[in-house]
């Protein structure tokens, strides 16, 4: 079908293309990627569904303002590398964002087609484009302006930092990224399971940044190994961007959380991802043996879904989601909840833990739970869970994983007290520039907002990069003009 001749009515008659996926019974026994990606034919068909609105509101729904209409038009015409180049004007991580961003609440939510039909699968098309570049062996690296002689330190290597570093490098500034762990990628590497975001994809996206001249230094704990002041005063950095995320897990403050077998989702997923527990027996497993055991995850967000689906793949006989509200109030993506159900995850809704119980050796044996009912909405707009008297019971479990959110690591603030922080220990910034209270220091992502999405963090990184560039006297040219 010729993309230039097809009418809007014909476009809207094309059904949304369903992405192939592993069979649930097979995938629950492996850590290979669940969704298999669109074929080129499917991608072109899906791209033809876009009616090329005169006012593409989908762009406004994207925190990094990808030129969605333009890259989709190029896919429809079969110019896949042109689509790669168009996306990379605004987003250097398309293979990642196409997999983990909640498009249904952002760009696809405002898609005009979605008013009467299913919205255009913008996220799936973004993933296709990123994968096409990698699989074809071709490169569409952004152009880099001539060197400005300025140097910027970026702390952390998660999505906010990578987005900021990418833009700064394109502006012509020297960028050095400092990462505390031995592996680059931040939450993309330690927080998201292999079956949802293969680590090799993250590494290959990072290689693209290296080709732009960005330097990476691992095993550097800023706030301990070196301070922000030392980076600026001794190492000669002209500006600093802080994108260290929110990696300090919250616990519930109930009795028994110190029992052996109770851990945070952060710790559990980090052990599985960075220590390769998913590749057992080729790698020694650094987590408790889940085979034949009962594992409960307390929480209802995307991280909780990642943790419970991981536990199931590690052999758990019973893998529970314990959530104090109903499914309607769950913050996790619908796709993740659907996939979890297909994989045999057991949902214990309207249930809250009161305490963890253990044996005389301090090993976890169960969770004392209470049934809940929904009352009036709270400050979040969700109906408040209210305890049902006399409904307490013991849920026998061998492992409890807490997934109720994360706070900010205080290391940087402890050694740089002139950076203002909020009561929640998040860094306070000017939202228009992402500048902190300390001159020349900027911040973005979860360290500012608390736990949020990959794409929102990337948007903050781009905002900061533009402000840093202006501070350093850099060019205001658009990247696609170079």
Image: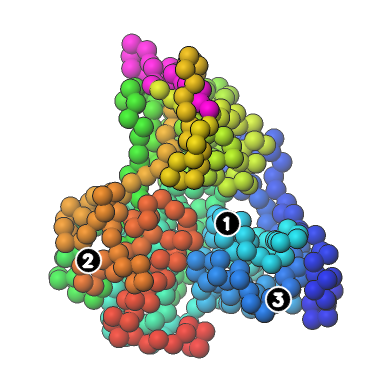
SS assignment at label 3:
loop
* Residue hosting label 3: 52
422 to the left or right of 379: left
Q: Residue 233, percent across and down?
A: 15, 71
The correct choice, above or below, for 452 with respect to 382 in the image is below
Residue 369 in magenta stretch: yes
Measured in 3D between alpha carbons, the distance from the residue under mark 2 to the one under mark 1, in whole angstroms, is 32 Å
Q: Is residue 184 visible?
A: no
Name the residue: 58% across, 71% down.
59
Name the residue: 16% across, 65% down.
230
Q: Nearer the viewer, residue 69 or 114?
A: 114
SS assignment at label 1:
helix
**Residue bounds of the magenta highlight:** 355-373
Name the residue: 26% across, 54% down.
422
> N-terminal of the two: label 3 or label 1?
3
Name the residue: 29% across, 69% down.
435
Q: Mark 3 near mark 1, Cβ–Cβ under 8 Å?
A: no
Q: Nearer the viewer, residue 59 or 18?
A: 59
Quarter where residue 2 is shown? bottom right
Residue 426 in magenta stretch: no
* Residue hosting label 2: 437
């Amino acid at each position: 079908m010729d993309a230039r001749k097809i009418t809007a009515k014909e476009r809207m008659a094309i059904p949304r293309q369903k992405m192939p996926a592993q069979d649930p019974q097979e995938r629950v026994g492996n850590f290979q990627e669940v969704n298999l990606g669109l074929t080129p034919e499917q991608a072109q068909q899906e791209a033809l569904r876009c009616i090329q609105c005169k006012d593409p509101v989908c762009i406004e729904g994207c925190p990094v303002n990808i030129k969605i209409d333009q890259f989709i038009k190029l896919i429809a015409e079969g110019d896949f590398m042109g689509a790669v180049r168009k996306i990379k004007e605004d987003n250097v991580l398309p293979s990642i964002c196409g997999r983990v961003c909640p498009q249904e609440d952002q760009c696809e939510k405002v898609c005009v087609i979605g008013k009467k039909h299913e919205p255009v699968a913008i996220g799936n098309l973004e993933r296709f484009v990123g994968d096409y570049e990698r699989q074809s062996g071709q490169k569409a690296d952004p152009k880099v302006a001539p060197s400005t002689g300025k140097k910027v330190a970026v702390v952390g290597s998660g999505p906010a930092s990578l987005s900021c570093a990418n833009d700064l490098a394109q502006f012509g500034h020297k960028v050095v990224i400092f990462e505390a762990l031995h592996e680059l990628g931040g939450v993309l590497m330690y927080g998201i399971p292999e079956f949802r975001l293969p680590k090799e994809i993250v590494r290959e996206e990072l290689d693209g940044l290296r080709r732009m001249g960005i330097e990476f230094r691992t095993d550097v704990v800023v706030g301990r190994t070196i301070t922000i002041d030392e980076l600026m005063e001794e190492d000669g950095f002209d500006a600093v961007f802080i994108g260290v995320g929110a990696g300090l897990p919250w616990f519930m403050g109930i009795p028994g959380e110190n029992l052996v077998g109770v851990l945070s989702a952060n710790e559990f997923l980090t052990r599985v991802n960075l220590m390769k527990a998913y590749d057992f027996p080729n790698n020694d497993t650094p987590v408790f043996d889940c085979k034949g055991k009962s594992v409960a995850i307390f929480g209802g967000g995307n991280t909780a879904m990642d943790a419970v689906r991981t536990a199931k793949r590690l052999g758990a006989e019973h893998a529970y989601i314990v959530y104090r509200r109903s499914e309607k109030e769950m913050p996790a993506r619908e796709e993740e909840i659907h996939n979890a159900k297909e994989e045999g995850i057991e949902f214990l809704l309207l249930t809250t833990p009161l305490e963890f119980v253990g044996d005389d050796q301090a090993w976890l044996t169960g969770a004392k739970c209470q049934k809940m009912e929904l009352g009036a909405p709270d400050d979040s707009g969700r109906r408040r869970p209210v305890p049902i008297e006399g409904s307490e019971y013991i849920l026998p479990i061998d492992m409890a994983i807490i997934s109720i959110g994360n706070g900010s690591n205080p290391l940087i603030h402890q050694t740089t007290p002139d950076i203002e922080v909020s009561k929640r220990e998040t860094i306070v910034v000017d939202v228009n520039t992402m500048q902190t209270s300390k001159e020349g220091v900027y911040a973005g992502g979860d360290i500012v907002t608390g736990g949020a999405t990959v794409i929102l963090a990337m948007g903050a990184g781009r905002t900061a990069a533009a402000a840093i560039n202006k501070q350093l006297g850099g060019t205001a040219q658009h990247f696609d003009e170079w």
